[in-house]
Image (cartoon, rainbow, N blue to C red):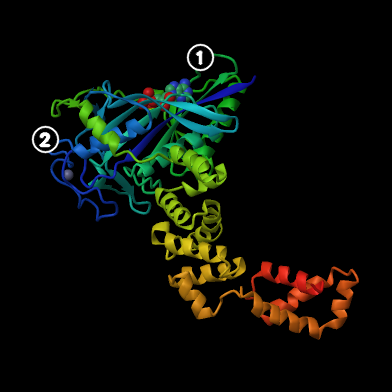
Amino acid sequence: MEYEPVIGLEVHAHLLTNAKIFCRCSTKFGAAPNSHTCPICLGMPGVLPVLNKKVVEYAVKMGLATNCRINDRSVFARKNYFYPDLPKGYQISQYAEPLAEHGRIEIETGDGKKIIGITRIHMEEDAGKLLHDERNPSSYVDLNRTGIPLIEIVSEPDMRSAEEAAAYLKRLHEILVYLEICDGNMEEGSFRCDANVSLRPKGRAAFGIRAELKNMNSFRNVQRAVEYEIERQRHVLDGGGKVIQETRLWDDGQGVTLSMRGKEEAHDYRYFPDPDLVPVEIGKDWIAEIEKTQPELPQEKRERFIREYQISSYDAGVLTASRALADYFEEAARQAGKPKIAANWIMGDILKFLNEDKRSVKDCPILPADLAALIRLIDDGTISGKMAKEIIDVMYKTGKKPGAVIEEKGMVQITDESALAKTITGIIEANPAQVEQYRSGKEKVFGFFVGQVMKATQGKANPKLINDLLKKMLSGS
Ligand code: ADP
Ligand code: ZN
Ligand code: MG
């Protein structure tokens, strides 16, 4: 039997607000345990949550960027369950009336572009974090994370392979980071994904029973977990068994998914509207205002780069990996007037330097203007491309301008025709036998003369000028 995988993702993203969603505690990662807490996020009785407006603004930004309808009214609901990292005994989330719905984004697949539907985006608070001590029979709870604002982005079950799931996830991640509403750090848990996977016989419309996968903290692990799960379910179905609806945990070390809880233990969250919070009403004016602050999104930027700068789609992909890099490129391209050449220097040299040092382009010692200046110096013949390679290396190490490096190293290219002609005359006079060979048709000795001129000028002469002059002077004209 041939099966078709069906995949839908639920993504949780921490919003980059300074304060938590319902209190003024800091959201900063890595503080001493329980130092960012107050009666509200500790869930003390009698306290009242107050919604942080910035959270709504950021959630709306994501809704707009993913082509969702922003509901003019949405409602916070209590999701009731007991767990030691949840002091109130319920999580404030949204349920029947979420903030945004009916969106879509485009991904690239092996067979071209594909639209993935977004079912809904809602706001909620994060829970705390349990730390289990392996050597000690005790667990600890850190409540710094309770009340950190999250958006949950639920996709339609539109993906058909692990690659598509990874492509969708990368696209969401990229949009969130471009919007500057999430730092996207998967290791710190700022961007988390649950993957729902089921199989159905090819050609059948109805979906199969799904398993929900958790605990994948990198794009690669999401892809591996989904791949593994597809194979596992295929095996179950081929053996005449049934897939059961359950939550499974990805075990990175073993490279397998393991059952965590089955249907019997499925939660009944008894959702109801939170009586402590009024419905969120968002006026058209505010949405229009937020819309005005939206940056150019990565996909739009890539398409514009290809169109405007005539660079390849691959290059546009690399250069739009972050907003900072895209800005760097555009500034250098504009000042140099040579986008393709600027792209090559950035992709070939600057990114290599930065990657080696694990440095962000924001901290690059070579400013876009310096790179542009270097490109212009090659262009006007002051230096050769080979010299520029040496110069850019020094520029990166010292932060000096290209002009200063050239001066220090005495690297100016000889472009003075009469000076070079004089050198060539000397070489011709000193090597009569080779001149004779060249004139009698042995073209190969030309290389010998180029070498001699290079040596005499210590590699500083413009290669094109050497060629032109040598040809002219060797043929006796
Ligand atoms: P729950 O909170 O119970 O997981 P949601 O509706 O919030 O339910 O999320 C379900 C997710 O699972 C969505 O991303 C949806 O696309 C996906 N999904 C639903 N049914 C299937 C299925 N049969 N196979 C794969 N994914 C599915
Ligand atoms: Zn607090
Ligand atoms: Mg789920």
Residue drawn at point x = 49 percent, y = 80 percent = 408
State yes or no: discs 2 and 1 in contact (Cβ < 8 Å).
no
Q: Is residue 96 above or below residue 276?
A: above
Q: Is residue 133 above or below residue 295?
A: below
Q: Is residue 149 above or below residue 283?
A: below
**Depth check, front residue: 376 or 422:** 422
Separation (CA) of disc 2 from disc 1: 45 Å
What percent of the width, then of the height, locates residue 46? 8, 35
**Depth check, front residue: 21 or 439:** 439
- Density class for disc 1 (Cα within 10 Å; few <14, some 14-19, many ≥20) is few
- From the viewer's perspective, is 83 left or right of 212? left
Q: Amino acid at mark 2?
A: Leu
Q: Tag 1, which secondary structure? A: loop
Q: How many marks on residues?
A: 2
What percent of the width, then of the height, locates residue 169? 45, 37
* Residue holding disc 1: 206
| Residue 205 seen in this snapshot | yes
* Residue holding disc 2: 48
